């Protein structure tokens, strides 16, 4: 009986470890592809692109500085990458710094059973404040980039209700974009003098 329990515990640990490794590799791959596409687009359009942090560190934690800076003729984008390692997870921004994440399908099943299950399958993430320069420039836009994107993305409105966040919507001082939508934004003629 004890031996069977040990094998079960080891199997569970191995499953979660394998799941994390797979999700981490997937995240790094998607962010590497995004960075390559961004650099190619910037080179083609004549924009300046500075990648300040590597994809591995970006996938693991959020820093107080921007991850990528892109300068076009009209705007300067300070991009902060927020990866969602697990594709079935949803993110809710209570504030810019406080994020709740959960698995919607799992919560649907277990929340009917007990409140403690809901609390056990919900995690909280703290996003450190972005160190913004003292100079206020209307050309500078702070971007919160989701790559890989979460299953669902919401924020709290002034009454505390969950409202969906679409590409280009504000989350505090940031504008939220998924990777593909941000590349499409940069590729529009309005960003350049072409």
Image: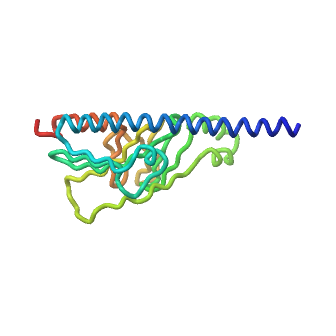
Among the 4 quarters of the image, the one containing residue 167: top left
Image coords of residue 119 (percent x, y): 63, 49
The quarter in which the C terminus is drawn is: top left
* Residue at 29% over, 36% down: 183
Furthest toward the left, the residue is 193
Residue nearest the viewer, comparing 53 with 16: 53
Locate residue 135 relative to residue 101 in the image: left or right. left
Q: Quick check: 117 left or right of 46?
A: right
Is residue 154 visible to us here? no
Classify 131 as above or below 174: below
Q: Residue furthest right?
A: 1
Front-lying residue, 99 or 113: 99
Residue 51 seen anywhere in this rendered image of the structure: yes
As drawn, the residue found furthest toward the bottom would be 134
The picture quadrant where one finds residue 158 is: bottom left
Q: Residue at x 61, y 35 (%)?
A: 18
Q: What's the residue at 23%, 53% (across, down)?
A: 140
Q: Position of residue 32 (x, y in %)?
A: 39, 37
| Tally of numbered tags | 0
Residue 92 at x, y = what percent? Answer: 48, 46
Q: Quadrant of the N terminus?
A: top right
Q: Nearer the viewer, residue 116 or 121?
A: 121
Q: Is residue 187 above or below residue 130?
A: above
Rendering coords of residue 86 (x, y %) = 53, 37
Please state if 33 lies on the left or on the right of 120 as rendered. left
Q: How is the image coloured?
A: rainbow
Indicate left or right for 84 with 8 as reference: left
Quarter where residue 189 is shown: top left
């Amino acid at each position: 009986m004890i031996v069977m329990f040990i094998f079960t515990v080891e199997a569970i640990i191995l499953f979660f470890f394998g799941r994390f490794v797979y999700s981490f590799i997937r995240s790094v791959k998607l962010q590497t592809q995004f960075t390559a596409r961004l650099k190619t687009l910037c080179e083609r359009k004549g924009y300046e692109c500075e990648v300040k942090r590597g994809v591995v560190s970006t996938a693991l934690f959020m820093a107080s500085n921007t991850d990528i800076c892109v300068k076009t003729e009209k705007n300067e984008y300070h991009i902060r990458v927020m990866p969602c390692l697990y594709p079935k997870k949803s993110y809710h921004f209570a504030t810019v710094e406080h994020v709740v994440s959960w698995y919607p399908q799992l919560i649907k099943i277990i929340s009917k059973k007990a409140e403690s299950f809901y609390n056990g399958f919900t995690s909280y993430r703290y996003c450190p404040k972005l160190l913004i320069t003292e100079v206020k420039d209307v050309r500078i836009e702070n971007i919160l980039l989701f790559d890989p994107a979460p299953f669902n993305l919401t924020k709290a409105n002034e009454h505390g209700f969950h409202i969906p966040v679409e590409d280009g919507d504000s989350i505090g001082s940031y504008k939220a974009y998924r990777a593909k939508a941000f590349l499409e934004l940069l590729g529009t003629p309005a960003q350049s003098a072409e």
